[in-house]
Image (spheres, coloured by chain):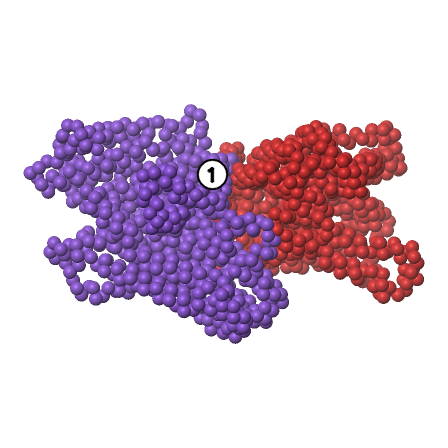
Chain colours: A purple, B red
Amino acid sequence: MASLADIGVSALINILGAFAFLLAFALLRIQPINDRVYFPKWYISGKRTSPRNWGGVVGKFVNLNLKTYLTFLNWMPQALKMSESEIISHAGLDSAVFLRIYILGLKIFGPIAIAALLLLIPVNVSDGTLFFLRRDLVVSEIDKLSISNVRPKSYKFFVHISMEYLFTFWVCYMLYKEYDRVASMRLNFLASQGRRAEQFTVLVRNVPHVSGRSISDSVETFFQKNHPDRYLCHQAVYDANKFAKLVRKRNRLQNWLDYNQLKFERHPDKRPTRKRGFLGLWGERVDSIDYYKEQIKDLDKTLTMERQKILKDSKSVTPAAFVSFNSRWGAAVCAQTQQSKNPTLWLTSWAPEPHDVYWKNLAIPFVSLSIRKLVISLSVFALVFFYMIPIAFVQSLANLEGLEKVAPFLRPLIEWSFVKSFLQGFLPGLALKIFLYVLPKILMVMSKIEGHVAISQLERRTAAKYYYFMLVNVFLGSIVTGTAFQQLHAFVHQPPAQIPRNIGVSIPMKATFFITYIMVDGWAGIAGEILRLKPLVIFHLKNMFIVKTERDLEKAMDPGGVDFPETLPSLQLYFLLGIVYMVVTPILLPFILVFFAFAYFVYRHQVINVYNQQYESAAAFWPHVHGRIVASLLISQLLLMGLLSTKKAANSTPLLVVLPVLTLTFHKYCKNRFEPAFRKYPLEEAMLKDTQDRASESDVDLKSYLADAYLHPIFHSFEEVELVEVKVDKNQAHVPSSSPSELSSPSPQHTYHHEDDPSHIVQHYEVEPNHTMYHYEAQSPSNIYRYEYAAEQHYQYYHY
Amino acid sequence: MASLADIGVSALINILGAFAFLLAFALLRIQPINDRVYFPKWYISGKRTSPRNWGGVVGKFVNLNLKTYLTFLNWMPQALKMSESEIISHAGLDSAVFLRIYILGLKIFGPIAIAALLLLIPVNVSDGTLFFLRRDLVVSEIDKLSISNVRPKSYKFFVHISMEYLFTFWVCYMLYKEYDRVASMRLNFLASQGRRAEQFTVLVRNVPHVSGRSISDSVETFFQKNHPDRYLCHQAVYDANKFAKLVRKRNRLQNWLDYNQLKFERHPDKRPTRKRGFLGLWGERVDSIDYYKEQIKDLDKTLTMERQKILKDSKSVTPAAFVSFNSRWGAAVCAQTQQSKNPTLWLTSWAPEPHDVYWKNLAIPFVSLSIRKLVISLSVFALVFFYMIPIAFVQSLANLEGLEKVAPFLRPLIEWSFVKSFLQGFLPGLALKIFLYVLPKILMVMSKIEGHVAISQLERRTAAKYYYFMLVNVFLGSIVTGTAFQQLHAFVHQPPAQIPRNIGVSIPMKATFFITYIMVDGWAGIAGEILRLKPLVIFHLKNMFIVKTERDLEKAMDPGGVDFPETLPSLQLYFLLGIVYMVVTPILLPFILVFFAFAYFVYRHQVINVYNQQYESAAAFWPHVHGRIVASLLISQLLLMGLLSTKKAANSTPLLVVLPVLTLTFHKYCKNRFEPAFRKYPLEEAMLKDTQDRASESDVDLKSYLADAYLHPIFHSFEEVELVEVKVDKNQAHVPSSSPSELSSPSPQHTYHHEDDPSHIVQHYEVEPNHTMYHYEAQSPSNIYRYEYAAEQHYQYYHY
């Protein structure tokens, strides 16, 4: 049990650690060589193409401007400069709302901390049970500031209960305001968006197989019949795993070709060569450029054939389709209604953003979905409560005896006492560490098996699973001793009334542990986040060994988005800690406040400079955040009840019973009031936007705009990009714009209609290979790379 | 503990009792005087207008045809003659599906009973633990046939577990087939219906108040904007409680007028007179017919003024409306989608049948609804678990000392020992009896407060509440000793794993009790149902004292519908008993089978001859029935696990854990697969019907057809019916048809448009009062009465 002084020392260490990280960050970020690690967002959005240069060869890598070193903390005010609306347009609504969660934490816990410190701590200190007891071994000094210090049966518990009421109302009030704000932000964001494919499109799953009729036909007939005047067109979903493989191979070859061409450009005197055999290790030596060109040409033929096969063969069409309507109203109606007598057929839902689609799961039939959900729920339950069993098994295998058996030659080394003790301390922990490291990935795989069709949805479901894991294994696991499995056993075999008591009693005792946790995981962890040590190292390693072309550089730079599946659950854990301890041990609150403030700065900086969100879900995660904060309130109330009942406060405890009921009612009200804004699209809105559209631009060819929007991303591959560019070249009509929105969405210029004539691309390609090549070389490389980058991103979505 | 012989005696007594009831029924039903009690449905449907007559004055009241006495059980084959489709057209889908529940019981428990009796009983008997113990006081002979007879740790429990699996699969299979059948019956029924107002109409609630604009205006603008080309018209909902009171008063007066006119017709020599004062007890003596005519005329003026006031005053319009569309498709779309940004405004749902609307609840705002639901949930919980507290309180008041204090003059009587002992035995029970008698009414009031807008919905919610009460207080209450409150206390303070054990252990011991319960409540109770003793007595009492006119007679005859709020829960209790005991004490199953078979006969007879369903919900109660049978399966599995764990069958019990998970998955699958058929209206269906309609009758004036369909029923009062008849008289176009469907639904000839000119009815009435009157007397009375009956029914709906 730590004394106040211990806590102070720990805080100092962590603050120093955090400062060290910040200092390192401040120094590293102004080095030009690291520019792509710390400011990738600006490269991606096209506002920066090369690092700031301070002159000279050395200046390319190291910052020589000494003035900038003096202002090394200026990223903080810089991060605050951007307004919220600017952040929304710069990084999307998801990121903006994500930042609001931290502000919400400050808004909730700021006043609570002040009230609790001013009111509750004097009340707790004044009673002095623990001073009186003087059992220093059991009781820490922190406990003297907590509710543990109040005498049993004391009337002072009325203060705690009324504070719990007050704080609950405050939290609910702030939550209500925030939900209201976020919901209207979402609706405004959706309303402010221009024409987007997903507004007109509905995803239809479980299209029934009618013998002698293709899926495409069925869809066409069905929607023309049941949504006449509104149905516009549809896009079939192809099962294209083999094609995707070939495309990946072609990308690799193209990359090698680019590399060799660049090499040749730089040294025109020497044509690069390679060997024909496996990995270029043996065989006849040939000209590399010719070799790759030839290989690509061969592969392109295979690709074209494979593509034709997919497009023509009705078996490769999965029973799902993206159906587009000629108005938002029509799509809103179709997405929200039941189509067929059999409610497991013709299931409609809003189409995710084209980037957000997780293609592999589109074809899962209804029955399979139910079974998958069941299996995954059971697995998650098992994972949360029994994950220690396989790890203990692995640990028992990975001991020294086992190691000696497997690798007898290591025996002398292992027998060396220093190594032995090190391994004995290290090995068992390793399995656990590895497990915790891969846990988010495991959970993501589980979510994928569950069959969600959007990446954003997958991330939300993963976040939920991770939260359950944290709740049971970090929160409860730290409070109650024993593994989660033992806890589960105890829960089943204890009276329900006993459980909150048992946990409630240990709550104040664990305050010092959680304070340390907040400092290590929260403060130092966040400082580590801004340093981006891992991406920094990986980027430089890749730059040294793998990066051959500009395209590789872009790939190595890719910062990813905010890691919602891990960040949201830990954020919610901090809310839980704050809410549980706000009445019990209020001294914990300042630590949480520091975390929220610091994390806000850091993530604001990261959102502005680093992250590049892959999809835009328009804050679809908010209802989950809200729900889990409300759940935290309930947990807090239950535990306080348990705690008070052990304090024999029989006359005051029943007063608390009303609070969970009120909290649940609040939650239900919010759910009814706001959640539809996150699940449905009101017809009023749809109609308004339709009318505006019709008034402003009446002669838009919506059909051609939507025709390709939901084409499987692998069909948007090289050739088409080139084709487009070729066309652009010829017509001189469009210049590929460099705004990020067009790049990251399949642009409407892709006028190639696969259904009409899948062969014409072949002709195109065979007729003008040199022209294409010429064009390819003539264009400014960065532009092409950008296109390729967009294409690349598509593959990533597909393989996500 | 009863022996087998005791059970046999009890069975004999109950069978004899049931036969006595049946005999009485058989005798009473063929008496002409009782014809309206036992065959009201035929009167209501117009297929019978007077009892069969066996000649003479006596023959009017008593059946003199001796031959009919010999065939007194022939109602049973008669009841079976009607096919299901005939029942649907005769009594509606609700009744037909209600009968199917009994057949489902037979289908489920028939094979299970055979398998259990042939397999499980030999297994149970062979082990003979209880024979060996010979503790006759504790163990009954029934127990020797039950699972209690199997030795602890026996491997024979594997037989029980595999039977539980087998039976669960069988029940699920039957449930699945039945759900499938009922869902398709429902869809066919809805598809086969002709044009009905509710197919085109959507109920909109929470219309926002916009200052300076009437509700009607808002609705019109909103739907014209957001559902153009589809919106047709709407009907405002009026707050008309005062008007309803006046209408009731007018009905009473009209009834007296009819009575006096009939009296005068029969004795034309003597005009009836009455006194002017209160209740005709004093004051000046006047001519009755003139007096009532004058009174009615005065009241009509007040009525007209009140009506005008309601129709003109915007304050009497509640923020709800029935919005009609020009196609089923349009209505289906509007009912299933979210209309406005704020999801608590413009809430749309399918309009209930016009008869099914519970008008008083239409105006409840959204926030109030949430609070009401919360309050009622808490009240139901309190009622289920703590209902004994107020009853015990009343009982403590209603003892003899209390009685003596209140009524000292009774002292000599009370002191008489016989009376004293009788009262002491009787009084405490009385409070409980009264409570149980009024319980369904209390639950109905609760459901009304909850704010449901349809009578069918109110009945379903009441049934759910009643089921919880029965489950806790009849099922659990009989198994576990102590009041529900004590049980609740025990549940909270016991480990969750202990609860199924405690209950499971007592389960086999209570088998004899439940067998007796089935015989008393099930067999004899059902025989009592067919005898209709209460309606019989009340009908004859009313006939003697109250009935003045034919209209009164119809009112006295009104049989009501199947009492779903009480019948469904007790039916579900029998399913629960059968499912819980199928493995534990299979000897109980034959008793349940007898109940289902017998009840099927009785209710089939009643549905055909007696009941007159007030509304048609198209089997909307089915998902609840299904859900509760699945819940019974879960309860059975849990209790069997508890029971086996006390039998130390540690090696076999874990096998059962999978079963609840499978059962829940089955339930979830069924819910997804079938429930939408009961909640939503698929667009495919709507479009199909629309197309058919347009093809068959293109020039129908839908607007005038829908204009009055959802007019508050009190506005369909006398005058209009008369007006219609007057119009009919003048035009000689339509003759009021006598088919029940037209009578019970506001017929499309009601062309009076209140919104256009609320005053024209006044003129009509004042210009032609005598003509109306003349017409009134000239028409065949039965026809008029039928109209009045329809109107009367409306008031009943309103005051339900």
**10 Å crowding of disc 1: few (<14), some (14-19), many (20+):** some
Judging from the image, what secondary structure is the residue with disc 1 in?
Answer: helix
Q: What residue is drawn where x is 42% and y is 24%? A: A212
Percent position (x, y) of residue A646? 59, 63
Residue B199 in the figure: left or right of residue A314: right
Which of B233 and A578 lies nearest the eye of the viewer? A578
Percent position (x, y) of residue B650? 61, 39
Q: Would residue B260 be visible to someone looking at this image? A: yes
Q: What residue is drawn where x is 63% and y is 55%? A: B493
Image quarter hosting the N terminus of chain B: top right
Parent chain of label 1: A
**Number of callouts:** 1
Residue A793 in the figure: left or right of residue B489: left
Which of B63 and B750 lies nearest the eye of the viewer? B63
Which of B655 and B553 lies nearest the eye of the viewer? B655
Extreme residue toward the top, this view: A212
Percent position (x, y) of residue B128? 74, 34
Extreme residue toward the left, this view: A269
Three-letter amino acid code at the position of disc 1: Arg
The residue at which mark 1 appears reads as A372
Q: Would residue A229 be visible to someone looking at this image? A: no
In the image, residue B151 sits, relative to residue B266, either above or below, namely: above
Residue A125 in the figure: left or right of residue B561: left
Q: What residue is drawn where x is 36% and y is 61%? A: A523
Q: What residue is drawn where x is 29% and y is 35%? A: A715
Residue B696 in the figure: left or right of residue B768: left
Percent position (x, y) of residue B777? 75, 45
In which quadrant of the rendered view does residue A637 lie? bottom right
